[in-house]
Every structure is written in C-alpha cells, then in structure tokens.
Image (cartoon, helix red, strand yellow):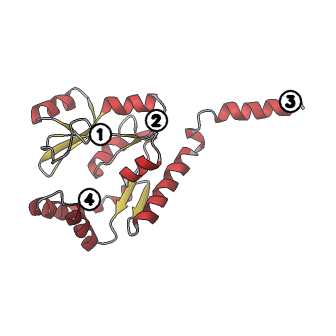
C-alpha cells in the first residue's frame, strides 16, 4: 500500500527506516533502509536522532528524525511504514499533532500467512515469528485514527487515498485558507 501511495502522489516523502538487520538481496543503503551496526544505531538513538525506534524480531528499527523534520519544513507529508510501537512513539512525539495513523488489517489470519509466504523474502523461522507476533500487533488496532481491512487491494487503496485527501482538506491543514477568506471579505467591502 505504501508503494502504491507513493506512486499515486509523488509529493509524499517516504521515511526510510534505519535498521540493524542485514540487507536482503537487492536492498541498498539509504534507499530501502539505512543499515547500521548495533553500536551505530544506539548512538543515533542516544543523540536524539530517531523519531521512533523499537526492537522487532531481534533487530532494531527506527525512523531518522532529520529527514522527517526537513520534509515537514518544506510542506511535504511524510509516509511511515512502522509497527504499532513506532506508530505510538510518533503519535506521542512533538510531531504527533500532525500525525494521521492508519492501521491495515488482513482479511484473515490464513490470508496473512499466505501473503507473507508469497513475498518470498523470509525464511520459515521469520514467517513463524511474524505470525506469532501478529496477534499482539493486531490487538493495537483501536489506537489508530483509521482502520482498513485489506480484503481487496484496489478497494483498500481507494479508501487509503480518500483518507489522505480528506486529511489534507481539514481546515487546520490549509495554511492559506485564512488569507483566502480575508480576500473574499474584501470583495464584499468593495461591492
């Protein structure tokens, strides 16, 4: 869904996560992830360089703060693909007032297992670990602003697009709206 959203709206900035896990075949440093050893990752956390971070399946993951703040300063929305721990930390951070959270549920546990296997990226042990952890992950659904069921990928994507559009149209997210309304009022006075 994240990839499709980026293709739909190229103005979105994707938050490239940092991790201590080893790169998979074809993954590039700075493109797919920022790959760090444990000491380098810990140093980033200690220096306040991570917006959120967590240990997942024995590896550390996190969102570097600087690129997110840079995108926000430039008026760009940033898309995160994080687990519930990361989402919670982002919502509780100084940037949280601007966060919109979306939890995407699988249509069934059987389908979740099928999709993990179809990706062809993980060993049986990793898939088993992800499946075991999925119950805990899913238990956090009620903490999110929006919850989508990914039963039909096209329909789920359309609902995700609708969320982005609606959130951007909120009054408080339209910085030029006050000036526009003032200009309308001046037109009344000039009549």
Disc 2 to disc 3, C-alpha distance? 36 Å
Local secondary structure at mark 1: loop
| Residue with the mark numbered 1 | 16
Residue at image position (15%, 48%) is: 25
| Residue ID at (40%, 68%) | 152
Badge 3 or badge 4: first in the primary sequence: 4
In this view, the residue farthest toward the front is 26
Left or right of 179? Residue 172 is left
- Reading the chain from its start, which is encountered first: label 3 or label 1? 1
Label 4 vs label 1, nearer the camera: 1
Pointers 3 and 1 in contact (C-beta within 8 Å): no
* Residue at mark 4: 137
Residue placed under numbered mark 3 in the picture: 189
Dot 4 or dot 1: first in sequence order is: 1
Quarter of the picture containing the C terminus is top right
Looking at marks 2 and 4 on the same chain, the residue that comes earlier in the sequence is marked by 2
Q: Nearer the viewer, residue 110 or 12?
A: 12
**Quick one: 10 or 48, which is closer to the camera?**
10
Distance CA(mark 4)–CA(mark 1): 21 Å
- Per the image, the residue denoted by label 2 is 76
Q: Considering the numbered disc 2 on the image, is that residue within a helix, a strand or a loop? A: loop
Going from N to C along the chain, the mark reached first, 1 or 2, is 1
Direction from residue 172 to residue 68 in the image, left or right: left
Query: Marks 2 and 4, Cα distance to the nearest angstrom?
Result: 29 Å
- For marks 2 and 3 on the same chain, the one whose residue lies earlier in the sequence: 2
Query: Mark 3 and mark 4: span between their CA atoms?
Result: 57 Å
Report how far apart the C-alphas of labels 3 and 1 lie in the structure: 50 Å
Disc 4 is placed on an element classified as helix
Q: Position of residue 94 (x, y in %)?
A: 38, 34
Please state the horizontal and vertical placement of residue 136, each as a whole percent of the image. Answer: 23, 61
Q: Quadrant of residue 12?
A: top left
């Amino acid at each position: 869904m994240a990839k499709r959203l980026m293709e739909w709206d190229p103005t979105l900035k994707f938050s490239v996560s940092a991790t201590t896990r080893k790169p998979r075949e074809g993954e590039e440093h700075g493109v797919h992830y920022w790959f760090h050893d444990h000491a380098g990752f810990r140093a980033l956390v200690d220096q306040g360089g991570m917006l959120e971070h967590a240990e997942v399946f024995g590896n550390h993951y996190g969102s570097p703060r600087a690129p997110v703040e840079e995108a926000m300063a430039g008026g760009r929305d940033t898309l995160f693909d994080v687990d519930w721990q990361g989402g919670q930390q982002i919502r509780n951070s100084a940037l949280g007032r601007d966060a919109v959270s979306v939890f995407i549920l699988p249509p069934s546990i059987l389908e979740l297992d099928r999709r993990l296997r179809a990706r062809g990226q993980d060993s049986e042990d990793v898939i088993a670990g992800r499946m075991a952890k999925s119950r805990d992950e899913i238990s956090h659904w009620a903490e999110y602003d929006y919850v989508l069921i990914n039963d039909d990928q096209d329909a789920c994507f359309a609902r995700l697009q609708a969320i982005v559009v609606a959130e951007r149209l909120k009054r408080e997210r339209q910085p030029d709206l006050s000036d526009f309304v003032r200009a309308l009022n001046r037109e009344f006075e000039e009549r």
